[in-house]
Amino acid sequence: MTDGKALPRPVVDGYPGRPSVRAGEVLRLHVSTRAERFRADFYRCGPRPRLMGRTRGRGAYAEPGSHDADWNWPVHDVAIPADWPSGVYIAVLGPDAESPDITSPDTTSPDITSPDEAGPDARFRDARRPVDAAALDARHSRLLFVVTAREPGHRARILYKVPLFTYHAYNRSGGASLYGALPGTEDRRTVTLRRPGGGIGGPVKGRPDAHDPATPRQTFAHWDAPFIAWLEAAGFTADYCTDLDLDENPELAHPYRLLLSAGHDEYWSGRVRRHTSSFRDRGGNIAIFGANTCWWRVTPDATGTAVSCAKYPPGVPQGADTDRMRGAPDHWWEEEPENRLIGVSYRNGGGHWDGLRERLGFTVQHTGHPVFAGTGLRDGDVLGAEHHLVGYECDGAAHRRDAHGRAVATGEDGTPEDFTILGVADLPAAPGSGWHTAARENDDPGRAATFGLYTRGGTVFNAATTDWPRLLRLDPRVRTITRNVITLLT
């Protein structure tokens, strides 16, 4: 969505007090409305959104706040049913025209009515089922939360990490995101998690996606929802968490075989990175079906309700492109290159942010690897070019060509030397190509996306392009590789 575009004034708006809740526990909603009463319809996002239940509450109005402080809207506690499966849930908020079914004070835990218990409320029972998460997406009157597992790892071998920090980095509720110039008194930008937005329900920083204009980038519906829909439809069972959960619990991933991330997981805290590295070192596997991963470091506050990031080197003019210069305090690569963990880095790839990209895919190699089983691909074939697989942002590893012309990771940039490059896409370097690149250790103008994997304790696979989830519905070979990776790592 274009910055600065006026939004309609919502009738009911809200946000969760915390972005996740364990099944059987209490979710705290913060809701503002001038309506006498409101309702919230809860959908779990899987192959198709599933209506799980509804709650109602008394309305109360509060003014919007700023981007950097808790909005402190009126509280409505909701008891989440113990039998709700782990997953990503969207609450659709609206005024309630029915008779109230809550007689307790506003701050108690009203029951959630399930569709089967709706009784005479036929409009609820027979509610039209959205075809996908994009049908639920909106810039207001929506909120997202994750239901975590009551027994971690009991029913699933996969833990899916929802990139909440990245959602809020681009969320412009309250007038600002983690982008743009800072006031003269600040050296770092702080954004609160307690405001509308964060994956859905808020204005988003960024340009429209010419290859998938139905939803804005940096929203749940754009990359994560399509991946989750495919994952569950393909028969895989996963538990879900946010990166805040992973930040706060060093052992959260330990009961699982695979930690999975997709799309655009750009902002990582120090603890998220340490806990993910520990999971790998203990033999846990990681699969990243995205790019620009772990590019910026964020620091949650002591309460877990805000994150901050320092992007501007000392003396740099406000509003400058900090990716193009050295010395940004919270660039991961300058202190602890992210590719030491994830295998690739955005600084070796690039981004194409505006308009249509040229057709660019991965030229594959080592096609005898089990990752390629059933694809029919041979060395030298190109994967995904017809659907613009590489972009909008992509990551790479420093590499050379061996005597057979195959790309081999050099390790000079921090990528593990045993990182096996399975595909390479050289980025266009001509002026006017639309590709943007970041500063790195050397002045070589050449950039390339490289997908592949390595093993150190556990195995780490990286698809190295944000648009990998988009091609799951378009390219059977991308689907097959994705299934192979997940099967091998679980």
Image (cartoon, helix red, strand yellow):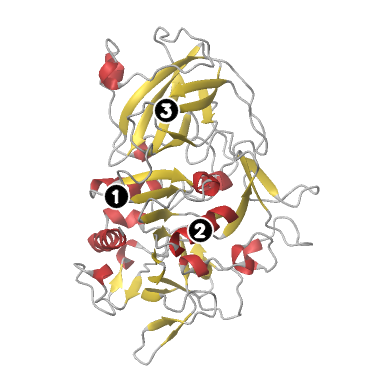
Are there few (<14), some (14-19), or many (20+) residues within 10 Å of tag 1?
Answer: many
Report which residue position mark 2 lands on.
353
Residue 112 coordinates in the image, percent (x, y)? 38, 20
Quick check: can you spot residue 223?
Answer: no
Q: Quadrant of residue 54?
A: top left
The answer to whether the residues at label 1 and label 2 have Cβ atoms under 8 Å apart is no
Q: Nearer the viewer, mark 1 or mark 2?
A: 1
Q: Position of residue 2 (x, y in %)?
A: 54, 45
Mark 3 highlights which residue? 92
Whether residue 2 is situated above or below residue 266 in the rendered picture: above
Q: Nearer the viewer, residue 224 or 102?
A: 102
Residue drawn at x 55%, y 54% is 268
Write down the residue under mark 1. Answer: 231
Amino acid type of disc 3?
Answer: Val
Residue under the image location 31 percent in, 47 percent down: 156
Q: Amino acid at mark 1?
A: Leu
| On-image quarter of the C terminus | bottom left
